[in-house]
């Protein structure tokens, strides 16, 4: 397994630590069309926005990792709260209300 690259804040560009104050505050996974998607939300206390790291593990092909953002705090807080409504957000086969609301009708 290769070295994990650092996630940069999509607002101010600084490197977000994997532990401590910049750690991932919420993460959710889903199976969509045979691929696995994991969205991890990082909050930057420096500039007050969220950065979303998306891991797309393709059934056929290479894994892709990219970031989205900046996500304004109110919108990010709402997403984090919704993810918190699932007791097993890492379960890509979960079909709870939180997973359905987050990923829509795209779930496998």
Image (cartoon, grey):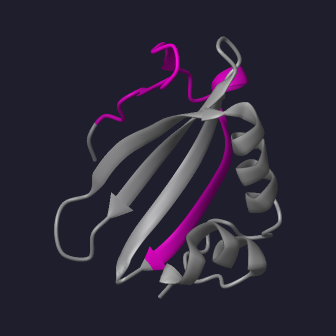
Residue 22, how many percent across, how many down?
A: 65, 24
Tell how many labels: 0
Q: Is residue 84 left or right of residue 19?
A: right
Based on the picture, tell me whether residue 22 belongs to the magenta stretch: yes
Residue 54, how many percent across, how many down?
A: 44, 50
Q: Residue furthest left?
A: 61
Q: Is residue 43 left or right of residue 18?
A: right
Q: Residue at x 69, y 42 (%)?
A: 76
Residue 24 lies in quadrant: top right
Q: Which residues are magenta?
A: 3-31
Residue 92 lies in quadrant: bottom right
Q: Residue at x 77, y 38 (%)?
A: 74
Q: Residue at x 46, y 78 (%)?
A: 31
Residue 62, how many percent across, how many down?
A: 19, 60
Closer to the camera, 87 or 103? 103
Closer to the camera, 21 or 73? 73
Q: Residue at x 44, y 65 (%)?
A: 37
């Amino acid at each position: 397994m290769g070295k994990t690259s650092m996630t940069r804040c999509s607002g101010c560009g600084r490197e977000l630590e994997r532990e401590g104050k910049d750690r991932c505050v919420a993460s959710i996974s889903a199976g969509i069309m045979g691929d696995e998607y994991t969205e991890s939300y990082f909050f930057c206390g420096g500039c007050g926005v969220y950065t979303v790291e998306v891991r797309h593990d393709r059934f056929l092909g290479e894994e892709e990792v990219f970031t989205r953002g900046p996500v304004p705090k109110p919108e990010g807080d709402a997403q984090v709260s919704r993810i918190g409504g699932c007791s097993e957000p890492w379960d890509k086969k979960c079909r709870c209300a939180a997973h359905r609301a987050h990923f829509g009708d795209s779930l496998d």
